[in-house]
Image: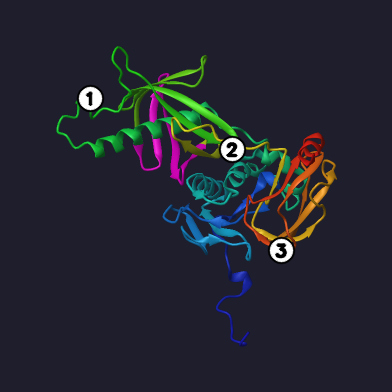
Amino acid sequence: AAGEALPLAQDQIRGHGHAIEARLYAEDPDAGFLPGSGRLERLELPHSQPGMRVDAGVDQGDEVTVFYDPMIAKLIAYGGDREQARLRLLNAIDHSLVAGPKSNLDFLSRLLRHPRFVDAEIDTGYLDRSLDEVLGAPQAIGPLGLTAAALRALLEEEQAAAVRHHGDDRHSPWQIADGWRLGHRGKRLQRFLAGDQSITIAAHGAAGEYRLDFDSEHQQVVSGARIEGDQLSWFADGRRFVVTVAPISGGYQIHSEGRRHNLRHLPAFAPTLATGASGDRLNAPMPGRIVAVRVAEGAAVEADQELVVMEAMKMELSLKAPRAGVVATLRAEVGAFVEADTLLVQLAEAQENSENAA
């Protein structure tokens, strides 16, 4: 710009090796890449891994707001060739952690593993044509992830009990939190909430040696369970397993079978949580401003009818009725700013609404 000479001409520049950049976003790929927001409760990025550069504009504890682009970081891997760069980037993504808003980490991991990406048979229009190949169907957490969550919870309970009781005799019954009862060893219940699914696992044993009962037909005998940071390792069926089980607010984030799952850890004897009928509630999918309300309380609506329009992340979101019914409750007001998961519309059956009015 100042008219000064450049140190090298274009034909003097030589390329060496290969680099791949991935952009880590607070977004939900399974919901059409809907931008996310919220506090970054945990953020761990591969700053120190060889062959990696991380450009991040936020830190753990910062807020991803609705007023700016929700990019968290750029992850750049470099190596002697494309495959080395790909493997370094894949390893970095698989060892990254975002807790708080949803992120595209799993999507990036699946993309880097996809055969067409591995073979470099892609172009700028590939995802537009073949997005379903990379997204895959949403999957519930499986037995491997549930085993890891239960083991972490059991070991943490035992560690907490050891801290509470400072006696010298580690083998005292007052020191051992194994659910012992006269005549049998007893059991400890571990309860989790995965979305709307409530999961209960009965555990027998202590000190890393357990039998886990998932239901009447599925049991798992575990030995040598131990915690090392966010890693949980154990032996079962002659094999060693290592799974990332990262503590987050109220529960754990499990990295299992190529996906991340957030589990809420419930008290063993807490009353069952009422999760609400998923087809009756229309909640704000993210923080934003209400720009239009298309219905009134008492109005009959059809499935997929537009009820509310929100503006967030410079986009307009059309929120539609999940089913046919009657608007029993309307809490959306034009101009109001709402947080994510705020109830906007509650539906009822037409007959229920008529009886309530009578």
Q: Are marks 2 and 3 in contact (CB under 8 Å)?
A: no
Which mark lies nearer to you, 1 or 2?
1
Q: Residue furthest top?
A: 183
Point 30% across, 12% down: residue: 183
Residue 132 within the segment the image draws in magenta: no
Point 46% across, 28% down: residue: 147
According to the picture, the residue beneath numbered tag 3 turns out to be 314
| Amino acid type at image mark 1 | Pro
**107 above or below 317?**
above
**277 above or below 345?**
above
Q: Residue furthest front?
A: 358
Quarter of the figure with the N terminus: bottom right
**164 above or below 1?**
above
Q: CA distance from mark 3 to mark 1?
A: 60 Å
Q: Are marks 3 and 1 in contact (CB under 8 Å)?
A: no
- Residue 30 in percent (x, y) is at 67, 43
Q: Is residue 59 left or right of residue 172?
A: right
Q: Magenta part of the protein: which range?
A: 227-255
For label 1, the SS is loop
| Amino acid type at image mark 2 | Gly
Q: Nearer the viewer, residue 138 or 279?
A: 279
Q: Which mark is first along the chain, 3 or 2?
A: 2
| Amino acid type at image mark 3 | Lys
Q: Residues within 10 Å of mark 3 (few under 14, many from 20)?
A: few
Q: Residues within 10 Å of mark 2 (few under 14, many from 20)?
A: few
Point 82% across, 50% down: residue: 306
According to the picture, the residue beneath numbered tag 1 turns out to be 173
According to the picture, the residue beneath numbered tag 2 turns out to be 195
